[in-house]
Image (tube, helix red, strand yellow):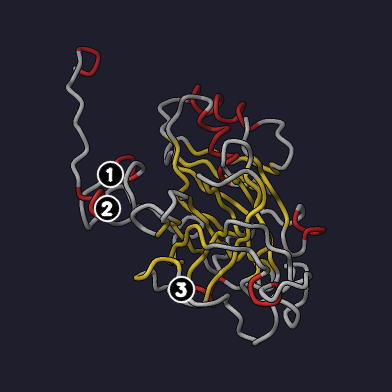
Amino acid sequence: MGNSASFGGAGQKDSMKKSNKLEFAVKMTCNSCVEQIRSSLDGIQGIASVDIDLTTGSVVVDTILPSHEILRCIQTTGKDAILRGVGGKEHKNLGAAVAMLGGESGFSAVGVHGVVRLTQIDETSCIIDGTIDGLQPGKHGLHVHECGDISNGCESVGEHFNPHGVNHGSPENDQMHRHAGDLGNVEAGADGRAVFRIVDPILKVWDIIGRSIVVTDSEDDFGLTANEQSKIDGNSGQRLACGIIARSAGLFENSKKICACDGLTLWDEKNKPLAGNSRQSKIPQQEPTASRL
């Protein structure tokens, strides 16, 4: 496949035990659709349970895998699917957020783009789940920054989110030996795509709404080298892409079918950016065919 999926981050030893629930809207018309989707997810290591509701068009997966991997499995059936909500196993929505890196919603001067989702599944576990494209193969630093100002690109988002005023460090460190925004590295495969899922015990979703996420061009050294930047930002290099962290829907919190602001349906919106001029462009309407009449 070419892309690289990385799991872990802070608390790596326990990351595989920390599952969350992903709610997908899927176009289903009959019980055969249900069985196709169930079959596509059956037997995959890292999936604890699958709940499919034909009436509501909902598929809920309890998993330790990145959302992109689950979406890809569902789409192998030929069904259209959208991630609608995320949350903890107990259906307690403690906070969910999303950041769009690059594109029209975020910023990148080099064409890097992606989406990062953050879910607080309990008081001590934040899941950072994302897919970033356009990277050079290898490891890249991923950090939460203190500001959500991208008026001057990624240079205006400030430094790493660091409420305790400590040195930069590894995501494995305790809160007095790392920035709260230090999320370590994600790894891109040969195709330039990084798919990742990190479980972090320090970061809290409620502390970072309105801040930003940045991916860098070099590997984070965790503050362990003699370079003068090491204890500041992990000597992780240029800021390639960034996006503002905005509140998003938790599990079962998004029942929207049509957007009230611009009339886009759930499925039209799938191919539109969250904001920007392209969102206002009209979606081409297909001509009716005999099979539809």
> In the image, which disc is placed on residue 259?
2
Amino acid type at circle 3 is: Val
Q: Nearer the viewer, residue 275 or 2?
A: 2
**241 relative to 227, above or below:** above
Indicate which label's residue lies in the foreground, 1 or 3. Answer: 3
Helix, strand or loop status at disc 2: loop
Near-viewer residue (20 or 275):
275
Q: Nearer the viewer, residue 287 or 242?
A: 242
Q: Residue tagged by mark 3?
A: 157
2 or 1: tag closer to the N-terminus:
2
The N terminus, quarter of image: top right
- Horizontal and vertical percent position of residue 133: 51, 45
220 vs 153, left or right, is right
Mark 2 touches mark 1? (CB < 8 Å): yes
User: Residue 69: percent from the left, percent from the top?
Assistant: 60, 39
Mark 3 closeness class: few <14, some 14–19, many ≥20 residues within 10 Å: many
Q: Quadrant of the C terminus?
A: top left
Q: How far from the left and from the top, in percent, is residue 82?
A: 44, 42
Tag 2: residue type? Answer: Cys
- Residue at left offset 50%, top offset 57%: 240
- The residue at the point 45 percent across, 28 percent down is 79
Callout in the foreground (3, 2) = 3
Measured in 3D between alpha carbons, the distance from the residue under mark 3 to the one under mark 2, in whole angstroms, is 30 Å
Question: Which element type, helix, strand or loop, lies under badge 1?
Answer: loop
Q: State which tag comes first along the sequence, 1 or 3.
A: 3
Where is residue 152 drawn, in percent x and y?
A: 37, 70
Residue denoted by label 1: 265
